[in-house]
Image (cartoon, rainbow, N blue to C red):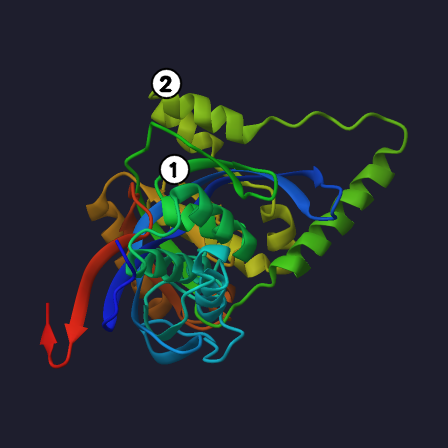
Amino acid sequence: MPIPEQRTSVTVEAPAKINLTFEIIGLLPDGYHEVSTLLHSVDLFDRLEISAVRASENHVHLKAYRSSVSGYFPMDDSNLVVKAVRAYLEHEKMADTTCEVEIEVDKNIPIEAGLAGGSADAACALVAMNEYTCGLLSEIELLELAARLGADVPFAIQGGISLGTGKGDRLKKLDTSPDLNLILVKPRKLFVSTPYLFKAFDRREKIRKVEEKDSELKSREKTTDIARTALENGDLNTFVRSLSNDFEPVFFDLYPEMQELKQLLIDLGCWKVVLTGSGPTMYGVAPNINKANLIARGLVADRMNNPDRPCYKHGAVDSWVVKSNSHGAVLKSMDHEKGDDKI
């Protein structure tokens, strides 16, 4: 099909992700960290609408932004959404076509929270552009383009559960997906820099190696492998026990009050509480969705009754009760406009 001549509005939504496991293996030749991680999408979604039409030259405008979460969302060309649309327009298959694109974003995924909200928005933009151009890029081409924008963008397109290796961008989609009931928690005024946390991790690892001197480093359990095997075998207990994040020791050294928040969530009834990505969001695994909602209410009540707890030093702790979900970025609507009429 040819690219539509008339202005077309495309709406796509994409989910947040959590890292069920996150292992830092070492350094790659390019200086990036090699990781092994199980990524899972959850039913907390950002939504993006593009309105596009053929034009004499490419023009991308971030027109509107509506948000239910706090945090800085740039409205200029530095935004990953704008970069994603520009990257699509600059693809070799678009060489003979120029477009005017307007973008509107509805944001529900917390910003700078370790939930890949920016990547979800970029995934929405790529999928929306590909819908507008009637599937100009193949799935492989779209994922290759996504990988150039960020390690989590390809996963945001695919969703479900995947094993991520390399920088986390080499994905292997898994057939078996857990049915998880979760509570996500994030102190509203706490934001963590991923590069800074990696540097802190590297300093900590170097100190550990110096202390061990000539002794061989103890081999670590490969928690990602353990979790994957348990999942494939239907062993929920082992699967939940193996959920982990190598950033946690460094993260809790820097923010000891977050260790208290983790223990509070366990006391309220979570089976397991784990940092996702570089944080500061943590996810708690609950027995069922009703219990997850009770935990969320218990957290609100605790802050009211104990406002001076260290874990509340960063202000209110926002929470979201979610379930794991099996899809990534998905088309919600597409309208072709001609004059005042939609066809």
Q: Nearer the viewer, residue 73 or 279?
A: 73
Residue found at x 34% / y 40%: 160
Which secondary structure, mark 1? strand
235 relative position to 195: left or right:
left
Q: Between 200 and 67, which is closer to the camera in this rendering?
A: 67
Q: Classify residue 306 as left or right of residue 314.
A: left
142 and 317: which is toward the camera: 142
Give residue 161's mark: 1
Q: Secondary structure at mark 2?
A: loop
Quadrant housing the C terminus = bottom left
Residue 43: x, y in percent?
28, 51
Residue type, numbered disc 1: Ile
Residue 81 x %, y %:
44, 67
View extreme (front): residue: 96
Picture mark count: 2
Given contact means CB atoms under 8 Å apart, are the residues at marks 2 and 1 in contact?
no
Location of residue 21 with respect to 292 vertically, above or below: above
Quarter of the image holding residue 11?
bottom left
For mark 2, what is the residue? 233
The residue lying at 35 percent from left, 42 percent from top is 285
Q: Relative to 218, is 154 on the left or the right? A: left
Marks 2 and 1 sit apart, C-alpha to C-alpha, by 16 Å
